[in-house]
Amino acid sequence: MLDTEKVIEYIEKIPSNPLLEGMGPQELEQNIFDSYEDIHSLYPKVIISERMIVKQMLYKLEGESNGYAMLKRQGVETQKINDASVTMSDNLLDPYVLFLINQQLQTKSVGHIGRLI
């Protein structure tokens, strides 16, 4: 369950980020909720930590500030400007958030050594 206050406390503990500077409380809460929903809608059974929410929020804000997010929403996969080209992944979630989710979803398998007769 989303606890916005805990997420805000987490944000206050991490190094400052220019993407969050000047953001009002209402806008911050909206971004927190949106990031939580991004993760929850794709992985409803995962325990979503404050770290996951903040990483996803920063990922989205960075994409918006660089203009990549709009291109991804419109389905653009590659963009070429002069001699430089960019290929975008189709991930909706921050790669680090995906790593944390996969750590939770991994089943712990135990290998056995033996011989069938």
Image (spheres, grey):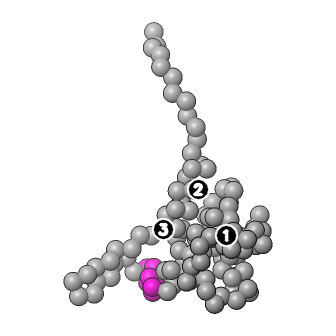
Q: Are marks 2 and 3 in contact (CB under 8 Å)?
A: no
Q: Residues within 10 Å of mark 1 (few under 14, many from 20)?
A: few
Any mark on residue 101, and which?
A: 2
Indicate the amino acid at tag 3: Asn
Give the position of the N terminus as an image quadrant. Answer: bottom right
Relative vertical location of residue 116 with respect to residue 109 in this rendering, above or below: above
Q: Which one is in front in this view, the residue at disc 1 or the one at disc 3?
A: 1
Q: Residue at x 75, y 68 (%)?
A: 6
The Cα–Cα distance between marks 2 and 3, rounded to whole angstroms, is 13 Å
Label 1 element class: helix
Give the residues in magenta: 66-75
Left or right, residue 72 beside residue 24 = left
Foreground residue among 26 and 106:
26
The Cα–Cα distance between marks 2 and 1, rounded to whole angstroms, is 22 Å
Relative vertical location of residue 9 with respect to residue 26 in this rendering, above or below: above
The Cα–Cα distance between marks 1 and 3, rounded to whole angstroms, is 27 Å
Relative vertical location of residue 104 with respect to residue 96 in this rendering, above or below: above
The residue indicated by pointer 1 is 13
Foreground residue among 13 and 49:
13
**Residue lying furthest top in this view?**
117
Q: Which one is in front in this view, the residue at disc 2 or the one at disc 1?
A: 1
Any mark on residue 73, and which?
A: none
Label 3 element class: loop
The residue indicated by pointer 3 is 91
Q: Position of residue 14 (x, y in %)?
A: 62, 70
Indicate the amino acid at tag 1: Lys
